[in-house]
Image: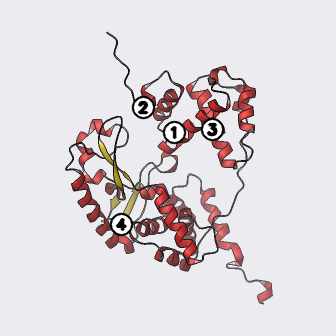
Amino acid sequence: MTVPERPGRLEDRPLTLLGQLRRVIRLRRYSGRTEEAYVDWVRRFVRFAGMRHPRSLTPADVRAFLSSLRNVSVSTQNQALAALLFLYRRVLRAPLPWLEGFELAKQPRRLPVVLTHNEVRILIDGLSGTRRLIATLMYGSGLRLMEAVSLRVKDVDFATRAITVRSGKGGKDRVTMLPESIVPQLQAHLEWAERGFREDLKDPRFGVALPDALDRKVPSARRAFYWSWVFPAHRTYVDASTGERRRHHLHESVVQKAVSRAARAAGLRKRVTCHSLRHSFATHLLESGYDIRTIQELLGHSDVSTTMLYTHVLNRGGRGVRSPADA
């Protein structure tokens, strides 16, 4: 008897190219954002090649696709190349020898945009509610935007005033501080979030999306509040693969737009993004006299040379050096 193939997710169809790609990416535990980016680049590559299968293409076809990306940023070019390398090396097992040694475009080293203490205060004062809370966490704890919006309740420790970041950039865990000044607001927010979670539980199909295979190992975890998001989205959705009703975390674009609006309203003459708050966190710690290794640990940098970039921002504009014109 032949078992019918289940419709639905691409990874359930191992004979399709994108299905194989998704499966290998997940076996290697790449992030969901990397998965979507690689799938998108492979899809674009196949369309560029006239819908021919990559196995039938030549190095010239790959070179032509990469050459067509001349008008995009360096990071975008490198991401497209990384996706094709992954496709040929890991999925198709047919690496192109010349592509293996293809030189990545060099990313110019830019100094980060850092706000002064007063600019941070003005920016955060221009925000309200959940957006203000997330912005304060990014500045007060050095969190990246996705690390902040995807925090789970269990990773906030009020007793030790610590936040555990799970699977941050590079798949690394780290611990950073929970600002004392934000504790009352965050506790009140979690009380509100728990009331909403209890309402969601009235639907027997409701469950929290869990990492790895935890939903099979600990089935009860999907209906435990401590596994839910600190910043839940306003709407629920139905997972097509399981039929469960779920609530995702707040989308990062909500915070990005709010920060951009607040920066414009405050008249800040800098290109302010959410990441500027993380840059400001590191720079202000340096100004306060904390050593570079401590800041490296809090930021989760693998190499201290990445953290050292903030010393250049700290000294910019003659900070600590008196101009001869002022003598």
Point 66% across, 48% down: residue:
75
Which residue extends farthest bottom? 327
Nearest to the eye among marks 3 and 2: give it. Answer: 2
Q: Earlier in the sequence, mark 3 or mark 1?
A: 1
Q: In this view, does 232 lie to the left or right of 28?
A: left
Q: Which amino acid does label 1 sit on?
A: Glu
- Residue beneath disc 4: 161
Q: In this view, does 158 lie to the left or right of 250?
A: left
- Residue beneath disc 3: 82
What distance separates the C-alpha of mark 3 from that of mark 4?
Answer: 39 Å
What distance separates the C-alpha of mark 4 from that of mark 1?
Answer: 33 Å
- Residue beneath disc 2: 9
What distance separates the C-alpha of mark 3 from that of mark 1?
Answer: 12 Å
Q: Earlier in the sequence, mark 2 or mark 1?
A: 2
Q: Earlier in the sequence, mark 3 or mark 2?
A: 2
Secondary structure at badge 2 equals loop
Closer to the camera in the image, 84 or 108:
84
Question: Is residue 281 visible in the rendered structure shown here?
Answer: no
Question: Is residue 55 visible in the rendered structure shown here?
Answer: yes
What distance separates the C-alpha of mark 2 from that of mark 1?
Answer: 14 Å
- Residue beneath disc 1: 35
Q: Which amino acid does label 4 sit on?
A: Arg
Secondary structure at badge 4 equals loop
Residue 323: give x, y in percent of width and height. Answer: 76, 83
